[in-house]
């Protein structure tokens, strides 16, 4: 077998990833010992990805932040029993996806899908604001955003969660599988079906 | 060459090659192999092209910035959690478990309604009791006892009377 070229950048990335994982576990172990400053560091590191994931899942910013509060509150409450057996982010996203899936199911039971859509639109309408764009650019962007939002919203919940973790959080299949508590091959299948659905829904945009 | 040996990912359910290709996370060797395969496979070419466009279009779905007071609210909740009464610490997990179980919600409602009805029933029974049961004094009891004795005696008389009649005949 020919010698593989030494991928310095790749190794550096891997080492950084390992360091990040160890750092998360180390911080959480310190939180377990009563170090609240370490909890602040974990919050600083994971606040934005968790909130953005939840925001895209439930498509309502205030609800997403409320659920994210619950995620971090549960992490804090569970600190005494924490053991670094799995990746910290896997645990974090498992809590987040459970909360989001429960919220979506409860909401579906409570209201009809039409009124939910109306609320979601209202909740996300602030999403695309002028950021130094012309009115036309802003409208095009708003329309594109709306199309993508609706297409993602139309996916079954588990597919939606898998796509969001894959696309926006760049998670590996094995990690998505751990979060969603299914096999890696099931995740690959979920993702492929989800992207195919999105492709069908957004065909006019291509 | 590897290109002709590669089996079609769509035919063999190896869709992760397509997913990785579109998300640009396929390693260089496999990427080159898949690109050579796509030259001959129109189905993979079309799928990869369309999914790559979707992948890029999804960048438009930006999330909103996080509220400035997010941490403040969280720490306030943690502070409340730290100072929660002891009895509530025991009740809170049960409550949160039940809240997370939609099947329990109707049962809880029914149980609450039944408990309320039971309380109302007992309270009303206690309140109504003096009205339903008229005040009975000792004299009435004595009279009732006498009446019962009279009835007994009457009964005895009736049972004895045919014999006495026969005796007289």
Image: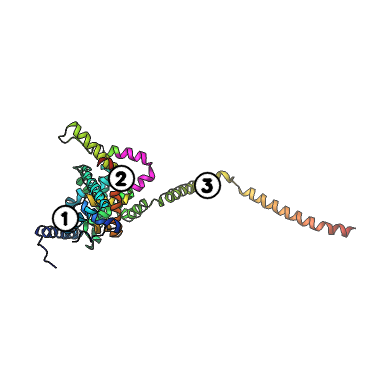
Q: Give residue A91's position: percent from left, percent from top.
A: 25, 57
Q: Residue at x 32, y 45 (%)?
A: A154
Find residue A39 and report its image quarter: bottom left
Colouring chosen for the image of the structure: rainbow
Residue B18, x across and y down, in percent: 24, 54
| Residue located beneath label 2 in the image | A200
The residue that appears at 21% across and 37% down in the rendered structure is: A141
Evaluate whether residue A176 shows in this view: no
Q: Which chain letter goes with mark 3? A: B
- In-image side of A197 versus B62 (left or right): right
Say if A116 sits above or below A193 in the image: above
Local SS, label 3: helix
Q: Is residue B62 left or right of residue A194?
A: left
Q: Quadrant of residue A107?
A: top left
The part of the chain drawn in magenta is A104-120
Q: Which residue, given by chain and number where applicable, does mark 3 sit on?
A: B125
Residue linked to disc 1: A38
């Amino acid at each position: 077998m020919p010698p593989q070229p030494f991928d310095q950048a790749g190794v550096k990335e891997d080492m950084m990833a390992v360091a990040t994982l160890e750092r998360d576990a180390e911080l959480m172990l310190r939180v377990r010992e009563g170090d609240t400053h370490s909890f602040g560091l974990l919050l600083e590191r994971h606040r934005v990805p968790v909130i953005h994931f939840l925001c895209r899942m439930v498509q309502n910013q205030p609800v997403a932040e409320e659920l994210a509060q619950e995620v971090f509150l549960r992490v804090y409450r569970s600190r005494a029993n924490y053991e670094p057996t799995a990746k910290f982010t896997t645990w974090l996203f498992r809590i987040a996806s459970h909360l989001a899936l429960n919220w979506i199911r409860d909401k579906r039971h409570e209201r009809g899908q039409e009124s939910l859509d109306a609320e979601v639109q209202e909740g996300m309408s602030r999403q695309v604001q002028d950021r130094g764009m012309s009115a036309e650019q802003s409208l095009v962007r708003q329309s594109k955003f709306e199309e993508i939002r609706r297409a993602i919203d139309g996916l079954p919940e588990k597919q939606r969660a898998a796509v969001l973790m894959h696309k926006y959080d760049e998670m590996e299949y094995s990690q998505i599988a751990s979060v969603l508590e299914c096999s890696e091959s099931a995740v690959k299948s979920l993702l492929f079906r989800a992207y195919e659905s999105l492709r069908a829904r957004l065909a006019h945009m291509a | 060459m590897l290109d002709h040996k590669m089996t079609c990912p769509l035919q063999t359910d190896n869709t992760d090659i397509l997913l990785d290709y579109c998300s640009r996370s396929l390693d260089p060797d496999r990427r080159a192999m898949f690109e050579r395969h796509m030259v001959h496979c129109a189905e993979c070419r079309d799928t990869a092209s369309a999914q790559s466009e979707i992948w890029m279009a999804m960048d438009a779905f930006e999330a909103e910035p996080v509220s400035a007071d997010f941490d403040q609210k969280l720490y306030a909740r943690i502070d409340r959690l730290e100072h929660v009464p002891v009895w509530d610490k025991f009740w809170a997990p049960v409550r949160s478990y039940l809240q997370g179980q939609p099947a329990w919600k109707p049962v809880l409602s029914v149980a609450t309604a039944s408990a309320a009805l039971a309380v109302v029933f007992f309270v009303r029974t206690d309140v109504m009791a003096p009205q339903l049961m008229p005040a009975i004094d000792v004299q009435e009891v004595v009279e009732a006892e006498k009446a019962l004795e009279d009835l007994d005696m009457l009964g005895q008389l009736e049972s004895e009377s045919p014999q006495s009649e026969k005796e007289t005949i």
